Image (spheres, grey):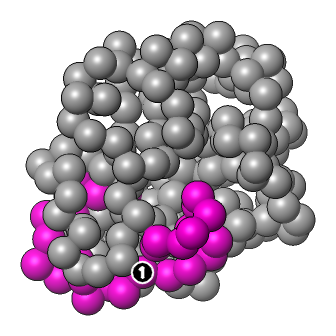
Amino acid sequence: MRVKICGITNLDDALMAVEAGADALGFVFYEKSPRYVTLSQAADIARELPPFVERVGLFVNKTAMEVDLACAEAKMSLAQIHFDAEERFFEALHTKALPVVRAKSKEDVARFSPRYRLVDAFCESYGGAGKRLALEWFEEADVARIVIAGGLDPDNVYEVAKMGFYGVDVSSGVERAKGRKDPVKVREFIAAAKEGACAAS
């Protein structure tokens, strides 16, 4: 079970999340988000991270060239494409990418299959806004290639992790304020996710 802590805005939160066992950190390059960081801010944080930590840049409505250039400047290792992109968009990218499915129904879960993908709850603004997905949508899906997001927190991630997802993604569920992580919640979330995954194996 991989755990991504998204919406990182400062070095202290980044290092705390890594120390707690996070496999990936997410940086939001969408200007309208309260967790927005500039490319230079993300690069400064990325330089201080230990090896083997995935650095994920979240993008909304950018071209493939813009994503590639931004990831290079910000030292991102993966691009999270948080808008409706066609296959040709991913073919044009030079950066490894994770498509995001903003799911409205059970049928949406299969979009981009068999790619690894992140499935989040649909909302008009980009990002899940803390909305939870219906877990029964995933009962017949191959969840081994799905990162699930949306409304996760330390209290519910254990049950989700037991379902065998490739990973879980959290932002607001481990915050004390928008863009500021709560160390206790981060540690509890990661521990519960890993424990749930072990129970499933």
Residue 137, given in percent of the width and then of the height, sits at: 25, 82
> Where 145 falls versus 175 (above or below)?
above
* Direction from residue 192 to residue 201 in the image, left or right: left
Residue positioned 26% across, 40% down in the render: 86
Residue positioned 84% across, 61% down in the render: 178
Instruction: Tell me which corner region of the image, top left, top right, bottom left or bottom right, holds residue 45.
Output: top right
> Where 108 falls versus 73 (above or below)?
below
Q: Is residue 125 magenta?
A: yes
Determine if residue 51 is in view.
no
Q: Amino acid at mark 1?
A: Leu
Residue 50, given in percent of the width and then of the height, sits at: 64, 22
**Label 1: how many residues lie within 10 Å, few (<14), some (14-19) or many (20+)?**
many
Q: Is residue 106 magenta?
A: no
Residue positioned 73% across, 22% down in the render: 39
Residue 125, given in percent of the width and then of the height, sits at: 62, 64
Q: Quadrant of the image for the N terminus? A: bottom left
Q: Quadrant of the image for the C terminus? A: bottom left
Q: Which residue is mark 1?
A: 133
Prevalent SS, magenta region:
loop
Determine if residue 139 is in view.
yes
**Total count of labels:** 1
Residue 153, given in percent of the width and then of the height, sits at: 61, 76
Residue positioned 79% across, 18% down in the render: 40
Secondary element at tag 1: loop
Q: Magenta residues? A: 121-147
> Where 94 falls versus 193 (above or below)?
above
